[in-house]
Image: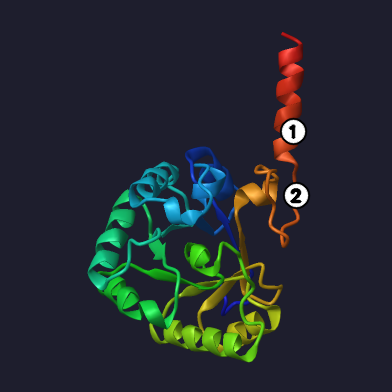
């Protein structure tokens, strides 16, 4: 799609009906993301999501037998060594993932290569890494704002390119650096809060639909107000019993 200059749309799904709707709408990539921790399970961040929970939701999505590529997030502390990374990735694939996503660059290159060595494709994730949010004081910070940040992102991107990854999510990367990475490296860049110049975009579907009204990221403009609509419909129904 990058070679053909086709824009790449990716969205999250954690259950059968949403995955089926996204696939019927023609979305080419469905991510079963560890964002399910916040928008489905009520955790404060992604670090609480377990591998078993990821497997559970992957199975639900995979039952749709979608045409879309199904990607599963490797959750926090499940790929700390190459051996653990392979075991975790194989469990996600057994649950229905066709590729796995891991957060990090050069620091996790051994894990990436180990996963690839058993025939499992890996999608990268650079910029703001949600699994590291506690290490950064609980703040989701934009990356690439200074020379050191830019250099780190470019070095990590080069490492992922060396590993021949097909795609890399760029989360909260400054738009100029996201544009530079997109132009310089062969992998497809899929942005979230990183400006318009990536090869594609990904959103948490709940954010797009206004289905999690208690928090909306600054970079998202919801296309529906599903949360408020649910409240209204339920109130109307209950009032007319």
Identify the secondary structure beneath mark 2: loop
Q: Residue at x 74, y 33 (%)?
A: 229
Q: Position of residue 30 (x, y in %)?
A: 51, 55
> What residue is shown with label 1?
229
Q: Position of residue 209 (x, y in %)?
A: 69, 46
Instruction: Using the image, determine if residue 120 lies above or below residue 14.
Output: below
Q: Is residue 44 left or right of residue 5?
A: left
* Image quarter of the C terminus: top right
> What residue is shown with label 2?
223
* Image quarter of the N terminus: bottom right
Crowd band around label 2 with a 10 angstrom C-alpha radius: few (<14), some (14–19), many (20+): few
Let me know if residue 32 appears in the view.
no
Of residue 219 and residue 77, the one placed in the foreground of this image is: 77
Q: Is residue 150 left or right of residue 156?
A: right
> Image quadrant of residue 26?
bottom right
Q: Residue at x 61, y 77 (%)?
A: 143
First in residue order: circle 2 vs circle 1: 2
Crowd band around label 1 with a 10 angstrom C-alpha radius: few (<14), some (14–19), many (20+): few
Of residue 44 and residue 87, the one placed in the foreground of this image is: 44
Instruction: Using the image, determine if residue 193 lies above or below residue 4.
Output: above
Q: Position of residue 121 (x, y in %)?
A: 37, 69
The reply to whether the C-beta atoms of the residues labelled 2 and 1 are less than 8 Å apart is: no
> Image quadrant of residue 200?
bottom right
**View extreme (top): residue:** 241
Identify the secondary structure beneath mark 1: helix
Let me know if residue 147 appears in the view.
yes
Q: Residue at x 69, y 84 (%)?
A: 176
Q: Is residue 18 left or right of residue 213?
A: left
Q: Position of residue 75 (x, y in %)?
A: 40, 58
Q: Residue at x 60, y 82 (%)?
A: 182
Q: Is residue 11 left or right of residue 124?
A: right
């Amino acid at each position: 799609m990058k070679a053909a200059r086709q824009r790449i749309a990716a969205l999250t799904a954690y259950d059968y009906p949403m995955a089926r709707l996204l696939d019927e709408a023609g979305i080419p990539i469905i991510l079963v993301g560890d964002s399910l921790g916040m928008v489905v399970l009520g955790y404060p961040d992604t670090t609480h999501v377990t591998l078993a929970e990821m497997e559970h939701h992957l199975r639900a999505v995979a039952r749709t037998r979608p045409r879309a590529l199904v990607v599963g997030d490797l959750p926090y502390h499940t790929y700390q060594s190459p051996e653990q990374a392979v075991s975790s990735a194989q469990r996600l694939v057994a649950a229905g993932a066709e590729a796995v996503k891991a957060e990090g660059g050069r620091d996790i290159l051994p894990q990436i290569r180990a996963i690839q060595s058993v025939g499992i494709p890996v999608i990268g994730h650079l910029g703001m890494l949600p699994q590291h949010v506690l290490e950064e004081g609980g703040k989701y910070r934009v990356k690439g704002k200074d020379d050191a940040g830019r250099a780190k992102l470019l070095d990590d991107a080069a490492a992922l390119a060396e590993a021949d990854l097909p795609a890399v999510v760029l989360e909260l990367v400054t738009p100029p650096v996201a544009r530079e990475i997109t132009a310089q490296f062969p992998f497809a860049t899929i942005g979230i809060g990183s400006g318009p110049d990536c090869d594609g975009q990904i959103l948490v579907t709940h954010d797009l639909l206004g289905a999690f009204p208690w928090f909306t990221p600054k970079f998202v403009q919801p296309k529906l107000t599903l949360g408020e609509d649910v409240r209204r419909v339920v109130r109307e129904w209950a009032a007319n019993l």
